[in-house]
Image (cartoon, grey):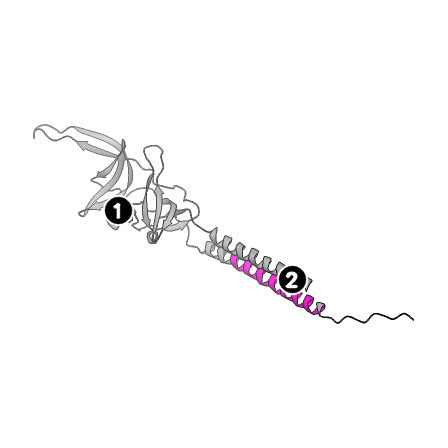
């Protein structure tokens, strides 16, 4: 019985360790980034509200996933560099393609020139014009009019034009390698668990019957 108890204890420990490994393998597959596919409108929202859309994230560019919140990602778009500042908000999971690493260019760094005119004082006088370079974040619409969401000197807002001709990232070829790798890893763990469990069970059975073997009577002298 002593050996039987030891074997059962070892078997229990093995099952617990292997189960823990399986859970860890599944947990390590969380994605940190997500990108917008080509010809897809994926909006960046101020809140978890479809009415709070700020702009459509440029095609083939990424957001960093900060956390998951139901059907939404709470994420970051752009960085504090150059003309840009990082924005934090929400995106619908269904609009994005999760990946482990960002594409070649994480976000669209594409400042644009915008002309601003002073009010005309007279029809015979050309209005005063100032051209500013602003950080373009993405296109939006209001009352069917094309707009761009931009940033300049600490302020966000819209200007009355859209940007269509911007450079794009190369999109990864459709693949299920990540899913296959995950399944293979989990399957290998399960197979290992089954094999070790079978060996342990056989060992327990052998030890059990060995402990039941009848003792031989002591030999008599002479």
Q: Secondary structure at mark 2?
A: helix
Residue 132's disc is none
* Foreground tag (1 vs 2): 2
Q: Is residue 16 visible?
A: yes
Identify whether 199 is placed above or below 142. Answer: below
Neighbourhood count class around disc 2 (C-alpha, 10 Å): few under 14, some 14–19, many 20 upward: few
**Where is residue 208 shown, x and y percent of the image?**
68, 67
Instruction: Tell whether 62 sits left or right of 206.
Output: left
* Prevailing secondary structure of the magenta residues: helix
**The residue positioned farthest toward the right in the image shown:** 222
Q: Quadrant of residue 115?
A: top left
User: Is residue 188 rendered magenta in the image?
Assistant: yes
Residue at 24% across / 31% down in the picture? 132
Q: Secondary structure at mark 1?
A: strand
- Callout 1 environment at 10 Å: few (<14), some (14 to 19), or many (20+)? some
Q: Does residue 169 appear in this view?
A: no
Of the pair 119 and 87, the residue shown nearer to us: 87
Residue 126 at x, y percent in the picture:
12, 28
Q: Nearer the viewer, residue 59 or 20?
A: 20
Distance, label 1 to label 2, CA atoms, is: 63 Å
Earlier along the polypeptide chain: callout 1 or callout 2? Answer: 2
Q: Nearer the viewer, residue 42 or 198?
A: 198
Q: Residue 10: where, in percent of width, then height? A: 63, 58
Q: Classify 212 as above or below 143.
A: below
- Identify the residue under disc 2: 5
Residue in view at x 63 percent, y 65 percent: 201
Q: Which residue is mark 1?
A: 53
Vertically, is 219 above or below 114?
below
Which segment did they paint magenta? Answer: 185-210
Compared with 5, 171 (above or below) is above
């Amino acid at each position: 019985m002593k050996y039987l108890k030891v074997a059962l204890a070892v078997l229990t420990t093995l099952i617990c360790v292997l189960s823990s490994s399986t859970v860890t393998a599944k947990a390590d597959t969380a994605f940190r980034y997500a990108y917008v596919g080509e010809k897809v409108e994926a909006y960046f929202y101020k809140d978890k509200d479809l009415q709070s859309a700020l702009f459509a994230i440029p095609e083939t560019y990424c957001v960093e996933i900060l956390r998951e919140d139901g059907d939404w990602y709470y994420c970051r778009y752009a960085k504090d560099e150059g003309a840009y500042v990082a924005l934090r908000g929400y995106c619908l999971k269904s609009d994005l393609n999760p990946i482990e690493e960002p594409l070649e260019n994480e976000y669209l760094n594409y400042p644009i020139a915008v002309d601003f005119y002073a009010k005309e004082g007279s029809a015979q006088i050309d209005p005063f014009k100032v051209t500013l370079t602003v950080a373009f974040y993405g296109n939006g619409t209001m009352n069917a009019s094309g707009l761009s969401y931009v940033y300049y000197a600490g302020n966000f807002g819209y200007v009355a034009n859209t940007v269509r001709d911007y450079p794009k990232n190369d999109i990864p070829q459709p693949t299920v390698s990540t899913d296959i790798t995950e399944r293979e890893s989990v399957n290998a763990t399960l197979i290992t668990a089954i094999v070790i469990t079978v060996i342990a069970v056989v060992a327990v059975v052998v030890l059990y019957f060995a402990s039941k073997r009848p003792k031989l009577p002591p030999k008599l002298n002479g």
